[in-house]
Image (cartoon, coloured by chain):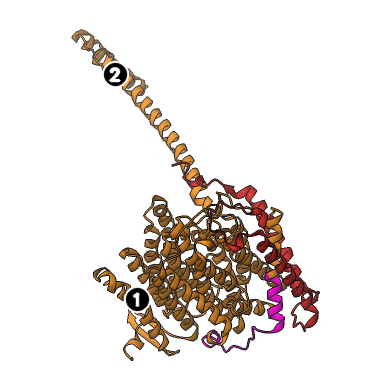
Chain colours: A orange, B red
Amino acid sequence: MTAIASINPGLILILGALPIPLLPQAIRRLYLLALPALGFAAVYQLEPGTLITMEAFGLTLELLQVDRLSLVWGYIFNIAAFLGFLFAWHDRDAVQQISAMIYAGAAIAAVFAGDLVTLFIYWELTGISSVFLIWASRTDAAYRCGMRYLLIQVSSGVILLSGTVAWYMLTGSIDFTHIGIDSLAGKLILLAFGIKCAFPLLHNWLQDSYPEATVTGTVILSAFTTKLAVYALARGFAGTEVLIYIGAVMAVFPVFYALIENDLRRLLAYALNNQLGFMVVGVGVGTELALNGTAAQAFSHILYKGLLFMTMGAVLFRTGTCKASELGGLFKSMPLTAGFCIIGAASMAFPLFAGFVSKSMIITAVAVEHHSVIWGTLLFASVGVFLTCGLKLPYFTFFGQDSGHRVKEAPWNMLAAMGLTAFLCVFIGCYPAVLYDILPYPVDYKPYTSYHVIQQLQIMMFTALAFVILLTFRIYPMDRKSINLDTDWVYRKAGPWAAKRLLGALGAMGSSIESALTQATTNTITVIKRHHGPEGMMAKTLHLSSMVVWVVAFLAFILLMDFVRGL
Amino acid sequence: MSEEREHKTEGRRSWLDDPKTVRKIVLALFVLCAGLFFADGFYEKHSHFGAEDVFGFYALYGFVMCVVLVVGAKLMRVFLMRDEDYYDRDR
């Protein structure tokens, strides 16, 4: 196993993706599951402290750097890829299979990249490979959305590269360690990470693109890009105070959007954004407990958010829609999917589920550092995300008003993927030691104290109580066919409008300049024609005698001048 | 909650369709909430902030924040809600 211990495990998936189209379907399906399984095994036998370097262009590239932080992400990314491909077992689209495999591989490879240049290469590769999961919807809307997505992802990479160059000029090293925001380089790199991490105002590519991807594509997309960004933040910017405030804003504002969103996959994208906020706060606090919390939260979040995206994918696959206004009462047709959705919802915060043992570490870390306002904000955000994902999503999809859909239960492979993910959510919730053992720092945290269990149950059940009461009195905003404006309005509506106006104004100016020039030319031609044309004075043939008169007059003039000079 | 339901179903009526069941579930929720609220008197709190020592703090916080959130989001709809074809209209 020494040979495999010296290559980046992400390469197993990236290079393994290349022969996919050559394989017959039956073998290909097993192959797609085998690659992440192999990747997981490769990560499992990596030893923290391993460092494989290569000299190129006078730089030391650290192709493989292993520590306990990167291992957490290495494990969960391989698990997510495996579950995603199981969910997509029925899919025969080779384009999606290859791009999803390269995408997952690039994310894993980026996690084990020890320097900024190697990170940049995989960083861009995640963006470029994942856009095909959006384009694979093969609609005009998906094409345009993919273009917007690509533009933003590539921009993040370009900013990362310029930050890397600035960092190299400053420090003479491209090593990816703690960076901080004191230098311009640090600020650029933070901006690059912030775009992919969906910081407030930079976030909207996420809610714009994920609902446009295919049924299976969204499940894959939800796991990697943003969590890779969280990892990069944890490595480069742990303890950067501004991240606490950015994360708090990020945890709060998306829940308002999620509450009034009609497209349920977009609702999940907003909720995902909110959960990232918790992780960013954890990075900002930067203590061992907080960073452990961030890693644990990333791990369980990938599972339960993936599970929720899977249930909505299954609903979309069977009913052809994912809009709250067109759904309801589906528990009769899809009881198992409904059950998995409830487990996914419960996994966000309920005792005995994954979110309970991870998210609370971050909230506790904030409380230990006495950030009272941030603590209150995060509690508010957990109420909000439970209300939207935990209550609204299952209620409007599977219960509530019957939409009349009479469909089959999800296919077996989707059920298997959802079942396995649900099992992992419960397993981690019941045996948190399994997760705590792989965290970056030694864990001295006990989630199951009577205080913690009761306070959590109080929050959740009273949120449910408020939901029921608000619903009964019809105060709760009902599902409506609609969209809500977000920052993408700037480049989808205001930008084009302004550009149109600007081009219009420039066009008008251009045509007035053109007509003025035409007028001037016409005038010049008219004048020339008047003097030099057939009738013009200058074109007249003069008589010889009049010429002599002119010559005499000219000579007389010279004579006169000479005479005047002589005086 | 039960008043919201309109049944288009023929035949396959489930136990959850029965308004009685729904009423029972809601009642159970009320009982559970009351139990959790008064549970605050029976254990020791390890609080970091003064507010946590208020009796039933987390219950009240959850309820109030939920209402704040819903009302806030409803207000947002006034400014932000558009038709589904909003971005496609100019095409």
| Residue type highlighted by circle 2 | Lys
- A424 vs A154: above or below: below
Where is residue B33 shown, x and y percent of the image?
A: 73, 70
Most foreground residue, B71 or A522: B71
Q: Amino acid at mark 1?
A: Leu
**Does A206 lie within the magenta span?**
no
Q: Residues within 10 Å of mark 2 (few under 14, many from 20)?
A: some
**Residue A47 visible in the shown view:** yes
From the viewer's perspective, is A565 left or right of A402? left
Q: Earlier in the sequence, mark 2 or mark 1?
A: 1
Chain of residue at mark 1: A
Q: Residue furthest front?
A: B11
Callout 2 and callout 1 share a chain = yes
Q: Please say whether residue A445 is one of the residues in the magenta stretch.
A: yes
What's the chain of the residue with tag 2?
A
Q: Residue at x 39, y 77 (%)?
A: A109
Q: In terms of secondary structure, where does tag 2 sit?
A: helix
A70 displayed left or right of A441: left
**Quadrant location of the C terminus of chain A in the rendered image:** top left
Q: CA distance from mark 2 to mark 1?
A: 79 Å
x and y, in percent, of residue A308 in the image:
52, 67
Give the left or right position of residue B21, taking residue A206 as reference: right
Residue on which the image places disc 1: A13
Task: Give the number of the mark in front: 2 or 1.
Answer: 1
Graded by Cα atoms within 10 Å as few (under 14), some (14 to 19) or many (20 or more), the crowding at tag 1 reads many
Across and down, in percent, residue A97 comes to 34, 67
**Which residues lie in the magenta part?**
A435-460
Residue under pointer 2: A529
